Image: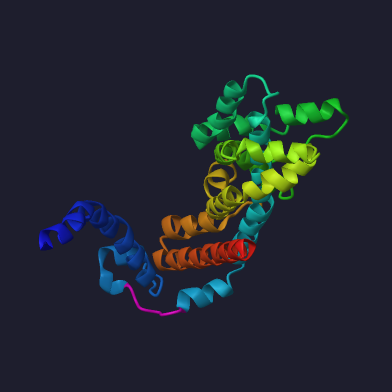
């Protein structure tokens, strides 16, 4: 009898052991490190790391670059997140329509940026954003609009990265929305048509309510992913110009792996964790109220 009880745990042991060694222990070590001044000298001798308790966290509150990076990250999440979800939903509705031809081809085309490496994408988009030879400024000039230094202007650098992120990521959310749309029973639309509902009423009274769980999942995943905004500014702008695209994760990377302030970087990481956890809890509470 006891063997049967412990048998499932024996099968789970390799996966749980891997999680313990490569996830939980590093997270616990980073949490403890956030209360120290762990730096490059401490790598050679752990005794050089001094316990400063909440010193890193109090320093963050007076660090203007931290607040700048945090504001940039919120800008990216608040603007880029909803736009990505809206574009993904519209693309999914179009691909789900029977009037849309070559749906499989467009589905592949929309999803290709998701699986394309960001370095290759960044090289192409840097040419697109080039102030003199980029195709975007060329098209603007054809309609009488003066070109913009997209990645060199502090006012336009973040919108340029948001546009890149939307194009790069909306295909993933589109596929999830498409699966949700295809799971909606046809009889709901038939009943709505019998009652005289047009396309708009079907969309707002059938499609949107039925997609609520899918939308909730997509929103949560998008917010979590966009709070980890790092690769785009790291590859495209290095946080510039004038720190206009400096994200919280890029600032964490700079502090931890450029200046070797590992304790300070760990504190930034846990501040980010608290923010993401807070937003996730808000989403869950709103979801429960909607179900009630």
Bounds of the magenta segment: 49-54
Judged from this view, the residue extending furthest toward the top is 102
The colour scheme applied to this rendered structure is: rainbow
For this rendering, which residue is in front, 179 or 41? 179
Q: Is residue 157 visible?
A: no
- Residue shown at the point (55%, 66%) measured from the top left: 281
Say whether residue 26 is visible: yes
**Residue 200 percent across, percent down from the top left:** 79, 41
Please state the horizontal and vertical placement of residue 4, each as a whole percent of the image. 14, 57
- Asked if residue 198 lies in the magenta stretch, the reply is no
Query: Up-down: is 263 above or below 94?
Result: below
Residue 288 at x, y = what percent?
A: 58, 64
Side of 144 where 111 appears, left or right = left
Q: Nearer the viewer, residue 104 or 109?
A: 104
Q: How many marks?
A: 0
Q: Is residue 52 magenta?
A: yes
The image quadrant where one finds the N terminus is bottom left
């Amino acid at each position: 009898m006891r063997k049967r009880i412990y048998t499932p745990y024996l099968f789970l042991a390799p996966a749980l052991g891997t999680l313990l060694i490569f996830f939980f222990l590093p997270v616990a070590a980073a949490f403890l490190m956030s209360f120290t001044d762990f730096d490059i000298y401490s790598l050679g001798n752990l005794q050089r790391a001094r316990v400063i308790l909440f010193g890193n966290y109090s320093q963050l509150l007076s660090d203007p670059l931290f607040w700048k990076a945090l504001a940039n990250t919120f800008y990216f999440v608040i603007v880029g997140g909803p736009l990505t979800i809206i574009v993904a939903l519209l693309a999914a509705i179009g691909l789900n329509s029977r009037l849309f031809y070559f749906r499989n081809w467009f589905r592949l085309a929309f999803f290709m940026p998701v699986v394309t490496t960001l370095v290759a994408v960044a090289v192409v988009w840097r040419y697109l954003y080039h102030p003199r030879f980029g195709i975007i400024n060329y098209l603007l000039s054809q309609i009488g609009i003066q070109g913009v230094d997209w990645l060199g202007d502090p006012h336009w650098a973040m919108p340029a990265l948001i546009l890149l992120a939307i194009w790069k990521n909306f295909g993933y959310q589109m596929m999830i929305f498409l699966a949700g749309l295809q799971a909606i029973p046809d009889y709901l639309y038939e009943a709505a048509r019998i009652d005289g509902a047009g396309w708009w009423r079907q969309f707002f009274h059938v499609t949107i309510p039925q997609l609520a769980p899918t939308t909730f999942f997509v929103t949560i995943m998008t917010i979590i992913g966009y709070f980890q905004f790092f690769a785009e500014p790291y590859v495209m702008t290095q946080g510039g110009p004038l720190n206009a695209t400096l994200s919280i994760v890029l600032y964490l990377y700079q502090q931890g792996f450029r200046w070797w302030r590992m304790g300070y970087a760990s504190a930034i990481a846990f501040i980010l964790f608290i923010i993401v956890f807070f937003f996730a809890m808000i989403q869950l509470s709103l979801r429960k109220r909607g179900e009630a």
